[in-house]
Image (cartoon, rainbow, N blue to C red):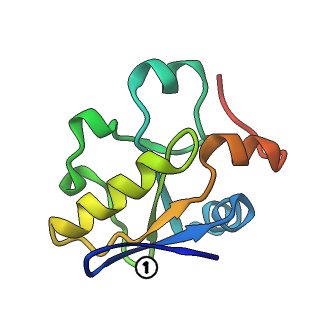
Amino acid sequence: MSDHTGGQARVRDLTPEEVARGLTEGRVVLVDVREPNETAAERFPGAVLLPLSAFDPAAIPSPPGCEIVFACRSGRRSVDASLSAQRQGFAYGSHLAGGILAWKAAGLPTET
């Protein structure tokens, strides 16, 4: 696991397997920050779609006891989303390292 830092903010890398297990166990809310044209072609099952171009962390459903995890295509925009949310006062410090590319490489399902 590695950490990305931006000032005081930190973003924790989660593996596809960790995220998938959290989704199955109902303790992760996966937030896909890719744009609508990308999510229309392929998306994570059960993810909340919140494009980075219209990013508002206040719009993310945050059930008690659930961890918010950001995801994108390769893991770059999800770090940006997490750092942006933290700058706005939200404690959203995790992302899917490697994005949907790593998710598919791990053999996990997508929806088209």
**Image side of residue 14 versus residue 51, left or right:** right
Give the residue at mark 1. 65
- Secondary structure of residue under mark 1: loop
**Image side of residue 89 versus residue 25, left or right:** left
Mark 1 residue type: Gly
Residue 27 image point, x, y percent: 54, 71
Q: Residue furthest left?
A: 88
Residue 42 image point, x, y percent: 61, 26
Residue 57 image point, x, y percent: 24, 55
Q: Residues within 10 Å of mark 1 (few under 14, many from 20)?
A: few
Q: Residue at x 60, y 58 (%)?
A: 97
Q: Nearer the viewer, residue 97 or 16?
A: 97
Which quarter of the rendered picture does the N terminus lie within? bottom right
Residue 20 sits in quarter = bottom right
Q: Nearer the viewer, residue 45 or 5?
A: 5
Residue 87 image point, x, y percent: 18, 67
Q: Residue at x 54, y 50 (%)?
A: 75
Which quarter of the rendered picture does the C terminus lie within? top right
Q: Residue at x 70, y 58 (%)?
A: 16
